[in-house]
Every structure is written in C-alpha cells, then in structure tokens.
Image (cartoon, helix red, strand yellow):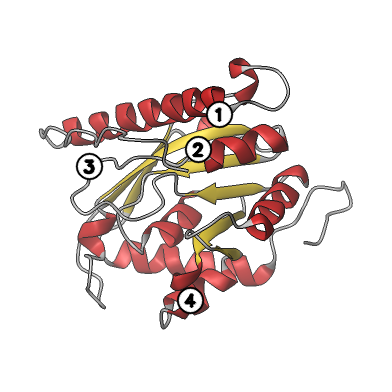
Amino acid sequence: MAESASGVPMTPWSYRLIRAIVRGVLRLYGGYTVRGLEHLPMDRGVLICPNHLSYLDPPAVGAALPRHTYFMAKKELFRVPVLGWLIRRLFAFPVDREGSDRAAVRTALEVLKAGNVLTIFIEGGRSPDGALQPASTGPALIANRAGVVILPASLRFTDKMLPRGSLFLHHARLQIDFGAPVDPAAFGEGRLDKTQLRALTEEVMRRIEALQKVQYERTGEVAPPRVKETADAE
C-alpha cells in the first residue's frame, strides 16, 4: 500500500472507487445506518469482528468504515461470480476453514502489524436465522500475536437485502454497529493459552450480543438467543 508524505498508509484509488460504488448501491436499496465509529482507532492496527448473516456483509462493513480494511474470507467465496471479483478488490485474502491455514494467519499478522484494519467474521459461517453461532478462537489468537485490540461489530438486515440463495438485492435498511474495543492484554501477558483465548473470545461475543440486542430493540423486537458453545470451535 502506498504511503503519504507523513508515512500514513493511503487507501488505493481502486478501493475508494469500489467503496463509493458499494455505498451508492446500498443507498439505492434502502441505505444503512452506522453507529459507534468513535471506537475505531484511526492510527494503528485493529481487528474488527462482526457477526455474519450474508454474503453482503464484507461489502457492508467496507462501506461503513472510514478506513481501508482487509478481509479474511473462506476460499470458496473467491469462486462465486461477481462476489469473488469484488472481494479481491476489497483486499480480501482466502482462508481454508477445513484445517489450520498457516499462510492465512501469517498474512493476517502482517496486515495488522503494518498498522492496517483487518475484518474477520468471528462465527466463520453465516447464521441461518440471525442467532449468533459458536465462535472460533482464531481471531483472538491473531489479535493477541499481532498486539492489536478487537473491535466487536453487529450487522442487521444484510440477510434481508441479500437473502441466502438470492442473486439479487432486496430493499432493506442496514444497521451496522461497532462497540468498544477489547484488549487481549487484559486477559494475560505474552501469548495467551487456550483458556485465555476462549475467555477473550467470549468477551468479544458478549459485546456483539449486546450490540445485536440493542439493534433488535430499535425495531421493537427481541434478538434470537445465542447458540451456546458445545466445544471449542477452533
């Protein structure tokens, strides 16, 4: 990524152009409301962990942020027509969710240590009904090793604008809420062990759950109950 005279990374013009197009399309189909951007650090690396409802989630997060964000996305998405083309230009890189993808972890650490924003959907797959699914401790491990905070986020109505199985957008107004950051250093010094990573992950999920609850309350509804962990979802 190019840098300005002050050394601050500059967002590539192609990313800015695509982000502007995505913002325009989202407005055309109902628009979006973004809250909590005051929690986003503007001068250092940060890992954003939203919930996951729809293939529209990565473009929606990118449109909401004033900073350029990279994405870690499952490798299968890169084979989806149009979406694969789009996320490549939104600086996504693939991860193999079937095993331990060391290359993806190395890329994530490089991105964050360089002072950039990285977005990882902490549940991994899309929720079938909006309820929060069991979370992986992978994002907690990456944030811990990179020395960055985790910014929880909650998306709502992306699955209404782009429902599962649909090839076309539907009218809906998206809600994108960011919460206060979680510092891995509060859970232990140095490299966190498995128990500490799970505790960090649980705190991030608790904050996402609180954001989601408020989103549902805005429309006079009750958020679906979170799917509890049955085992460590690595």
Q: Name the residue under label 3.
A: 131
The residue lying at 70 percent from left, 18 percent from top is: 189
> Could you tell me residue 211's position as x and y percent?
33, 31
**Does dot 4 land on a helix, a strand or a loop?**
helix
Q: Mark 1 points at which residue?
A: 194
Label 3 and label 2: CA atoms lie apart by: 18 Å
Using the image, tell me which numbered label, if any, was put on residue 84.
4
The residue lying at 31 percent from left, 26 percent from top is: 210
Residue type beneath disc 3 = Ala
| Label 3, residues with CA under 10 Å away: few <14, some 14-19, many ≥20 | some
* 216 shown above or below 110: above
Whether residue 175 can be seen here: yes
Asked whether 229 or 108 is in front, the reply is 229
Label 4 and label 1: CA atoms lie apart by: 33 Å
Q: Given contact means CB atoms under 8 Å apart, are the residues at marks 1 and 2 in contact?
A: yes
Label 3 and label 4: CA atoms lie apart by: 26 Å
**Does dot 3 land on a helix, a strand or a loop?**
loop
Residue 125 sits in quarter = bottom left
Asked whether 28 or 90 is in front, the reply is 90
Which numbered disc flags the more N-terminal residue, 2 or 4?
4
| Label 1, residues with CA under 10 Å away: few <14, some 14-19, many ≥20 | few
